[in-house]
Image: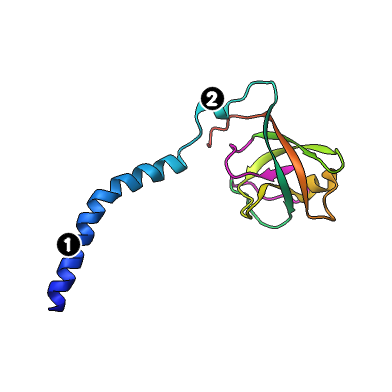
Amino acid sequence: MTVKRFAAVAAACVCLSAFTAPAFARDHHKVHSPKPASHSSHSSSSSKVRSGTASWYQYGRRTANGERFNPDGLTAAHRTLPFGTRLVVRNRRNGRSVVVRVNDRGPFIRGRVLDVSRGAARKLGMIGTGTAPVDITVEKTETLASN
């Protein structure tokens, strides 16, 4: 009896996977496909990306693009923007701004839109608070051969 039950469950799984796998593969591909060229190649004029909360970090040995992490550099982690993108980040609390380069992925905490290095956080005046409300504007997107 258990062999028949096992065979029936296995057959049902095979049938279900045959119908659901293509849909999953299509959805999986859409989630991880690169952004369209019109989104990733910005003109020389600045365009507003987002307002939200930024945090800073100083840990890690390597960034997502393979560089050695420099905590005092002017770099940032963003979830989707291409590596090499230069962003103007403005702290809405005090008006300070800094230009950072995206070289890492993150932040992975709900409600945050950007992680900046300790050096960028110092220039933004957010070392003590840890987070700050910011406006993020794309200044320039560099085309990297490794992307």
Q: Is residue 70 left or right of residue 81?
A: right
Identify residue type, mark 2: Ser
Q: Nearer the viewer, residue 64 or 111?
A: 111
- Residue 18 in the image: state x and y as whole percent: 23, 51
In this rendering, which labeled residue sits more in front, label 1 or label 2?
A: 1
SS under mark 2: helix
Q: Is residue 8 left or right of residue 94?
A: left
Q: Nearer the viewer, residue 4 or 75?
A: 4
81 is within the stretch colored magenta: yes
Which numbered circle lies on residue 11? 1
Callout 1: 10 Å neighbours few (<14), some, many (20+)?
Answer: few
SS under mark 1: helix
Q: Nearer the viewer, residue 48 or 123?
A: 48
- Residue 88 in the image: state x and y as whole percent: 74, 34
Figure check: 29 above or below 128: above
Tell me the residue that label 2 is attached to.
Answer: 38
Check the image and name the residue furthest to the top. 44
Magenta region: 65-84
For residue 37, say whether it is visible.
yes
Identify residue type, mark 1: Ala
Q: Could you tell me which residue is drawn at 82 percent across and 55 percent down?
A: 129
- Residue 44 in the image: state x and y as whole percent: 68, 21
Dominant SS in magenta:
loop
Q: Could you tell me which residue is drawn at 24 percent across and 55 percent down?
A: 16
For residue 73, say whether it is visible.
no
Q: Could you tell me which residue is drawn at 78 percent across and 55 percent down?
A: 130
Q: Nearer the viewer, residue 146 or 39?
A: 39
69 is within the stretch colored magenta: yes
Q: Quadrant of the N terminus?
A: bottom left
Q: Earlier in the sequence, mark 1 or mark 2?
A: 1
How far apart, in angstroms, are the residues tagged by discs 1 and 2?
46 Å
Specify the quadrant of the image occupied by residue 26: top left
